[in-house]
Amino acid sequence: MTFLKQYLVLALLLFTIISCRREEVDGIKIGGTALYDNSSFEENKELCLLVEKTISSDEKALTELIHFKCGDAAGCYDLGYVITQIVYKIGESKFSEMAIKLSEKDKNELNGFIEVGLEYFYKNRIFKSEFKQLYSILNPKSKI
């Protein structure tokens, strides 16, 4: 094989490896969703990094995750699914410690994501009863 052919094969292989989007992050499923299907490599990389940091209790990452560009309605429902998976993974108590520090606007956004994440991906699970502590933080005027 000539040098040019070797270079092209190596470049193609490297491009393929680098451009692969991740479908899962630490057990959090992203693939198979509109959020995944409609994201570029860069957007997928950013989402994966935000998920990793949020799992590690990075409050700033949670805020950025809440504001992640999820596209249309289906993509935003999928982001709700990603967020609810994080709550299950790290535990409601640990997640609530981050959520309590959010602005009221961000709490409202997070509330919506968790509602749709549970409604569409975890049938028969109601936010108010599934995550009582978190629900009370995000809905302080509601009586459980």
Image (cartoon, rainbow, N blue to C red):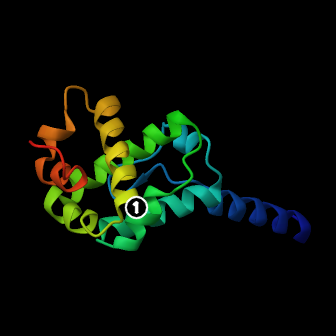
Locate residue 107 relative to residue 95 in the image: left or right.
right
As rendered, which of 120 and 102 lies closer to the eye? 102
The residue under label 1 is which amino acid type?
A: Val
**How far from the left and from the top, in percent, is residue 129?**
12, 38
Q: Residue at x 78, y 61 (%)?
A: 9
As rendered, which of 89 and 68 lies closer to the eye? 68
Of all residues shown, which one is farthest toward the left?
Answer: 144
Counting other residues with Cα less than 10 Å from the Cα at mark 1, is it few (<14), some (14-19), or many (20 or more)?
many
Q: Which residue is mark 1?
A: 51
Residue 144 occupies which quadrant of the picture?
A: top left
**How far from the left and from the top, in percent, is residue 113?**
37, 45
Q: Residue at x 10, y 43 (%)?
A: 143
> Relative to residue 45, is residue 121 depicted above or below?
above
As rendered, which of 23 and 53 lies closer to the eye? 53
| Count of marks, rendered view | 1
| Residue at disc 1, secondary structure | helix
As rendered, which of 30 and 91 lies closer to the eye? 91
